[in-house]
Amino acid sequence: MANTQAFCTQAKADLMNGLHAFGASVVRGATTKDAYKAALFLVSATRGAADTVYNTTGEVTGTGYTAGGVAVTTGTAPSTSGTTAFFTPSASIVYTTVTLSTAFDAVLIYNDTSATKLAVSVHTFGSQTVTAATFTLTMPTNDATTGLIRIA
Amino acid sequence: MLPVADLTFSEGGVDNENECTTWQEWRAADGEIVKRAVQVRLKKGLTPFVETEGFS
């Protein structure tokens, strides 16, 4: 038996749960999970890995849509399988009866509990517009292969 | 909103490696989109690989 270098699998899930702080951390007011939101962004926006926080630059505007987007349902805690930790919102992200006339193709998931609205991830899809109807973003299967956010 | 009978309905979508998207559209006689609903199913999320390096 030899030693094997590894990023411990449980530590990946622990990162997702805020149990490690390699840098300066924050004082958390409670042990409850944070609230997350999902905001939509125009095709012309430049959202991506460089984003650190949510802001309205390039965000869609339109009837029925509130800046900041809608709540993300986090009913299922992060999990692990094999050596991968993964998390997927437990319900579809739904923008009910909106009119978004300018094409959009991205959603930013961000931490709505954090004071600065820390960015988590950007997910893209085919360019869309919506007129007086509902836009539904259905989540992938929550596993180590397709989960929305994975650390492998 | 015009009576449903006066609207032209169409639907479509795409199914590729990343998403399965469907849309339904209702247009007035002049071509204006009166209603357009969209459902996007993301097939796969993100895998930001975390790698560790050994000492050499």
Image: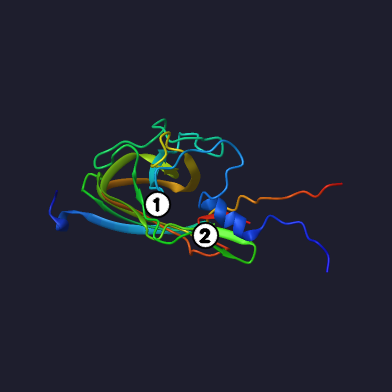
Q: Position of residue A125 (x, y in %)?
A: 47, 49
Of all chains, the one bearing label 1 is A
Q: Quadrant of the C terminus of chain A?
A: bottom right
Of label 2 and label 1, which has the lower sequence position? 1
Relative horizontal placement of residue B17, taking residue A106 as reference (left or right): right
Residue B14: quadrant of the picture: bottom left
Check disc 1 and report the residue beneath it: A32
Of all chains, the one bearing label 2 is A
Which label number is shown at residue A147? 2
At 50% from the left and 52% from the top, the residue drawn is A17
Q: Position of residue A78 (x, y in %)?
A: 50, 59
**Quick check: marks 2 and 1 in contact, CB under 8 Å?**
no
Q: Position of residue A99 (x, y in %)?
A: 27, 43
**Mark 2 and mark 1: Cα distance apart in space:** 22 Å
Q: Label 1 is placed on what type of residue? A: Thr
- Of A3 and A60, nearer the camera is A3
Q: Quadrant of the N terminus of chain A?
A: bottom right
Number of the front mark, 2 or 1:
1
Relative horizontal placement of residue A60, taking residue A27 as reference (left or right): left
Q: Label 2 is placed on what type of residue? A: Gly
Residue A108: quadrant of the picture: top left
Mark 2: give few (<14), some (14-19) or many (20+) Cα within 10 Å. Answer: many
- Of B2 and A45, nearer the camera is A45
